[in-house]
Image (cartoon, helix red, strand yellow):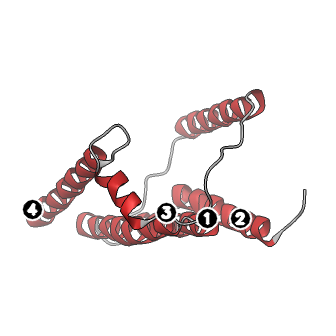
Amino acid sequence: MDITLDLIVFVVLALFIVASSILAVTTKRILRAATYLLFVLFGTAGIYFQLNYSFLGAVQLLVYAGGITVLYVFSILLTSSEGDQAEKLKKSKLFAGLIATLAAMGICLFVMLKHQFLPSHFEHGELAMRTIGHALMSTGKDGYVLPFEVISILLLACIVGGLMIARKR
């Protein structure tokens, strides 16, 4: 296997995402966990840009890294007092989490080794914005109108819930 710049960038981004993910779930400070989540989302956007999925990378940066993380930070700051820390996990819960993680890794490894993944054939290059718009807003089998509307209702419920919690204080 040839070592190319693309491979090096992918490995660096993957290690960055893995390290940030581990830090996000192991830190005791809730605000730091949200910051590490932001780093994970930036790394994911970097992988999208490396794969020439510029639209998906831009959506990742704008919607997830920009909007959702800011929403998380606001909800954390509105609902928790200064210096809130996550509770220390009991050893039984830590052991159960470790067992579940190892089982999931074993299943993934089994699937990757047992099945032959055939390369997919697709056209390289950018899609026309009209094609993306039709795919997002069509109501057919491959349309995304219903998931788009469900996500917008979920975000609205999060905003209303955050306002209700802030209003009680």
Which three-letter amino acid code belongs to the residue tagged 3?
Answer: Leu
Q: Is residue 65 left or right of residue 169?
A: right
Which label sits on residue 153? none
Q: Of helix, strand and loop, which one carries label 3?
A: loop
Q: Examine the image and state in which quarter residue 130 appears.
A: bottom left
Residues at marks 1 and 3, CA–CA distance in whole angstroms: 18 Å
Q: Is residue 120 left or right of residue 161?
A: right
Q: Residue furthest right?
A: 1
Residue 113 is situated, as x and y percent measured from the top left of the image, at 77, 32
Number of other residues with Cα within 10 Å of mark 1, as a class: few under 14, some 14 to 19, many 20 or more:
many
**Label 3 sits on residue:** 127
Residue 80 is situated, as x and y percent measured from the top left of the image, at 28, 64
| 1 or 3: mark nearer the eye | 3
Of the 4 image quadrants, the one containing the N terminus is: bottom right
Number of other residues with Cα within 10 Å of mark 4, as a class: few under 14, some 14 to 19, many 20 or more:
few
| 3 or 4: mark nearer the eye | 3
Residue 122 is situated, as x and y percent measured from the top left of the image, at 61, 51
Residues at marks 2 and 3, CA–CA distance in whole angstroms: 23 Å
**Label 4 sits on residue:** 168
Instruction: Indicate which disc, 3 or 4, sits on the residue closer to the N terminus.
Output: 3
Which label sits on residue 47? 1
Which three-letter amino acid code belongs to the residue tagged 1?
Answer: Ile
**Label 2 sits on residue:** 10
Number of other residues with Cα within 10 Å of mark 3, as a class: few under 14, some 14 to 19, many 20 or more:
few
Instruction: Indicate which disc, 2 or 1, sits on the residue closer to the N terminus.
Output: 2
Please report the residue visible at 62 percent of the width from the left and 34 percent of the height from the top: 104
Q: Of helix, strand and loop, which one carries label 1?
A: helix
Residues at marks 1 and 4, CA–CA distance in whole angstroms: 41 Å
Asked whether the residues under the numbered discs 2 and 1 touch, taking CB atoms below 8 Å apart as contact, a structural biologist would say yes
